[in-house]
């Protein structure tokens, strides 16, 4: 592949020697480098194993070694001659320090395996795994040939009620609802011979649809006593470390099933059966994975006073790791089920859920470094291609190899691949920041491994971000979801990115992405607004209201003043302090900058007087309290002190006037402040006692 050391070195502010066979005849240069003690970046991932072996053979090799791919991502492309700025950017990114370690989640598995499926297949699987695991079979039918007569493993049967948990902590709940007790059954087959309907199979369970209640089977089983039609159903529960499901329909039908649950739809005939059994053997012991998220309840807009607000994270999670806890005004994330997709953090409007692997500040530093180095090396119209570290990376590398063989164009010179743990783990805070840092487009690569809900969420968030850019006057398409499952499809999609030239700010921002999502969004918006074409020639305080889609984390609310009684229930429900009262006057005030469009005010309002209006207001009053409604205060009829609002008191009087408990003096007390109400009730009680005496 073509390389220009001077261009690369100038962008990185150092001199770079060019090696054409670093892993072969020029290997001593690598060995000398790793003896220096300085960090060494190897721009080759093809021979990563070989470089590792060389490092082990090199005396006094103390340098940390990191690898970066510049071959398939740029060097093997029809644009390779113009890809030096991109290569410089990738090299600069590789030199960034590693993110700080994150907390981990632990699993412990002792090899207690539950095999669920037809008895004959379950026993075959058990025979292949019995040397390493403690096996229990849950029979769901006899299968084609039936099971073996010899009872080598515990066999359960009945109706499965629930299967939950994860690696090392599965719980199976089932009901034994069959007349045959498998613990007592000796497999003598007398019942099979006696049954005239052949309602009993070699799984030794009675098929209720065939049985005509002759009870011949029960009579021939008197010695063992395994068959009893009067036996009541019994509920049971057991714990397992692993689950192998051989049924046609999975017991856990999730896009991202729990760690330790493996499903073979075709049983042992499934093409993946061998790999699955090998994988099961590797799931014994103690394991750790990153804790992918941070949760801050004080920022969460999920619920208040058992009213549901934002539920986006619960709805998008394909691993069923997030659940609602209305009573505690929060969501609950089970880290053992979380697979690290990050979709919940992408749709979270407040930043209550933040991605931690790596955190946003590290991601922001990476994007700023990539784009700044790319621009310094003379690159223009940079496109960030965000892809997963598994399917996405493999597809990009396949495309590079196809280009090397002349069967594809390859990754264009201005398209910079950026590897993520999962394609859904970034959102509008980082996307808009990338445009502020100098990118012309942000593309997210979906290879087909993603859950459908993730793609829906990405499209919705991109629609919001694109509406912001177009509303500010920037022309073109800045955000794209690239769906490609083959190198040819990816090649076609990337060609469209090469030809697009959307409008962006002329000057790159230098702010640092923060840990708080809303703060990062505000900094990115400030930069984009300052250079916005729609603001040119207008006064600094001129208002610009940009209509946004419903998924927007920005917006205002509309209050129907005729319905609103100024009860201020919405103020207590608002988690972001966007709705506020006025301690000196009956007013409902609103700070639009704080609003996250969670909808708690709408669901809390007893008068149905509030509706959400997603938008981005570009004006100074966005950060200032504005009065949405105000009312005349009600004065106590006894002491004249103002309390409540006239409209609220009049509405209460109208509703309670016909109630038997609020007649006469009781109704009048509703017109008093709390102090006078107590005094009046006390006085009336004493006067009544005096009259009775």
Image (spheres, rainbow, N blue to C red):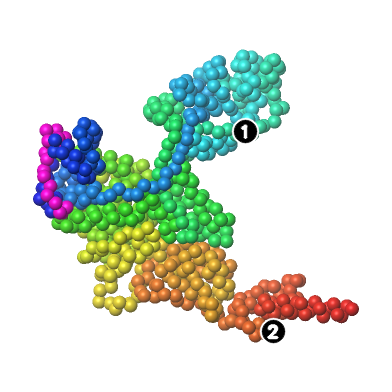
Q: Please provide percent x and percent y for residue 249.
A: 49, 34
Q: Nearer the viewer, residue 509 or 95?
A: 95
Identified at 15% across, 39% down, the residue is: 32
Label 1: how many Cα within 10 Å (few below 14, some 14–19, many 20+): few
**Image-based side of 689 in relation to 185, left or right:** right
Label 2: how many Cα within 10 Å (few below 14, some 14–19, many 20+): some
Residue farthest to the right?
A: 693
Separation of marks 2 and 1 at Cα, in angstroms: 67 Å
Task: State the predominant SS element of the stretch in magenta.
Answer: loop
Residue 25 within the segment the image draws in magenta? yes
Q: Is residue 550 above or below residue 268?
A: below
**Image-based side of 80 in relation to 595, left or right:** left
Residue bearing the label numbered 2: 638
Residue bearing the label numbered 1: 236
Q: Nearer the viewer, residue 91 or 664?
A: 91
Q: Nearer the viewer, residue 636 or 566?
A: 636
Q: Is residue 528 above or below residue 275?
A: below
Question: Which part of the image, by quadrant, shows the C terminus?
Answer: bottom right
Q: Please provide percent x and percent y for residue 209.
A: 62, 28
Identified at 30% across, 69% down, the residue is: 529
Secondary structure beneath dot 1 equals strand
Q: Is residue 631 above or below residue 18?
A: below
Span of residues in magenta: 11-27
Residue 436 within the segment the image draws in magenta? no
Q: Please provide percent x and percent y for residue 226.
A: 66, 21
The disc at residue 283 is none
Contact between marks 2 and 1 (CB within 8 A): the answer is no
Residue 264 visible in image: no
Q: Please provide percent x and percent y for residue 469.
A: 30, 64
Identified at 53% across, 80% down, the residue is: 584
């Amino acid at each position: 592949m073509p390389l220009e050391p001077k261009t690369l070195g100038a962008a990185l502010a150092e001199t770079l020697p060019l090696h054409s066979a670093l892993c072969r005849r020029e290997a001593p240069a690598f060995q000398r480098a790793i003896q220096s003690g300085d960090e060494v970046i190897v721009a080759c991932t093809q021979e990563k194993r070989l470089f590792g072996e060389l490092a082990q053979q090199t005396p006094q090799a103390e340098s940390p070694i990191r690898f970066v791919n510049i071959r398939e991502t740029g060097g093997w492309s029809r644009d390779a001659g113009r890809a030096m700025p991109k290569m410089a950017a990738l090299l600069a990114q590789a030199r960034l320090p590693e993110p700080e370690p994150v907390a981990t989640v632990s699993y412990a598995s002792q090899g207690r395996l539950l095999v669920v499926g037809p008895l004959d297949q379950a026993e075959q699987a058990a025979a292949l795994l019995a040397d390493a695991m403690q096996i229990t079979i849950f029979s769901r039918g006899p299968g084609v040939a039936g099971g073996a007569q010899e009872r080598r493993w515990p066999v359960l049967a009945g109706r499965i009620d629930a299967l939950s948990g994860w690696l090392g902590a599965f719980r199976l709940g089932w009901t034994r609802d069959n007349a045959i007790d498998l613990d007592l059954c000796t497999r003598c087959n007398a019942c099979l011979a006696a049954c005239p309907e052949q309602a009993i199979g070699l799984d030794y369970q009675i098929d209720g649809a065939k049985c005509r209640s002759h009870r011949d089977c029960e009579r021939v089983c008197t010695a063992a006593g395994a068959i009893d039609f009067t036996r009541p159903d019994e509920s049971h529960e057991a714990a397992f470390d692993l689950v192998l499901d051989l049924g046609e329909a999975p017991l856990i039908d999730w896009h991202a099933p729990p760690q330790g649950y493996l499903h073979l739809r075709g049983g042992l005939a499934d093409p993946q059966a061998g790999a699955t059994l090998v994988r099961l053997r590797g799931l014994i012991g103690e394991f750790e994975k990153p804790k992918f998220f941070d949760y801050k309840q004080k920022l969460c807009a999920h619920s208040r006073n058992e009213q549901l607000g934002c539920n986006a994270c619960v709805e998008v999670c394909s691993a069923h790791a997030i659940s609602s806890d209305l009573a505690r005004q929060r969501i609950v994330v089970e880290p053992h089920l979380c697979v690290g997709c990050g979709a919940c953090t992408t749709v979270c409007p407040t930043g209550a859920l933040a991605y931690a692997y790596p955190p946003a500040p590290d991601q922001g530093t990476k994007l700023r470094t990539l784009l700044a180095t790319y621009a310094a090396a003379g690159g223009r119209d940079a496109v960030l291609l965000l892809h997963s570290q598994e399917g996405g990376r493999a597809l990009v590398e396949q495309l590079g190899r196809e280009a090397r063989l002349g069967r594809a164009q390859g990754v264009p010179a201005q398209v910079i691949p950026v590897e993520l743990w999962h394609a859904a783990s970034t959102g509008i805070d980082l996307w808009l920041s990338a445009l502020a840092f100098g990118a012309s487009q942000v593309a997210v690569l979906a290879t087909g491994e993603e859950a459908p809900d993730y793609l829906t969420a990405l499209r919705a968030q991109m629609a919001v971000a694109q509406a912001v850019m177009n509303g500010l006057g920037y022309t073109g398409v800045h955000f794209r979801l690239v769906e490609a499952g083959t190198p040819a499809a990816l090649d076609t999609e990337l060609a469209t990115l090469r030809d697009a030239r959307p409008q962006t700010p002329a000057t790159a921002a230098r702010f640092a992405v923060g840990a708080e999502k809303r703060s990062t969004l505000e900094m990115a918006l400030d930069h984009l607004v300052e250079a916005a074409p729609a603001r040119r020639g207008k006064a600094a305080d001129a208002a610009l209201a940009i209509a946004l889609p419903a998924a927007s984390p920005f917006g205002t609310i509309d209050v129907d003043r005729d319905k609103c009684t100024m009860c201020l229930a919405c103020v207590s429900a608002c988690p972001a302090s966007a709705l506020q009262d006025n301690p000196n006057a009956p007013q409902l005030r609103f700070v639009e900058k704080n609003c996250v469009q969670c909808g708690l005010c709408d669901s809390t309002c007893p008068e149905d007087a509030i509706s959400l209006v997603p938008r981005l207001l570009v004006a100074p009053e966005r950060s200032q309290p504005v009065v949405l409604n105000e009312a005349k205060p009600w004065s106590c009829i006894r002491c004249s002190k103002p309390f409540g609002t006239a409209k609220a008191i009049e509405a209460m009087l109208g509703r309670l006037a016909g109630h038997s408990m609020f007649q006469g003096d009781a109704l009048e007390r509703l017109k008093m402040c709390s102090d006078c109400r107590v005094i009046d009730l006390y006085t009336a009680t004493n006067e009544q006692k005096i009259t009775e005496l």
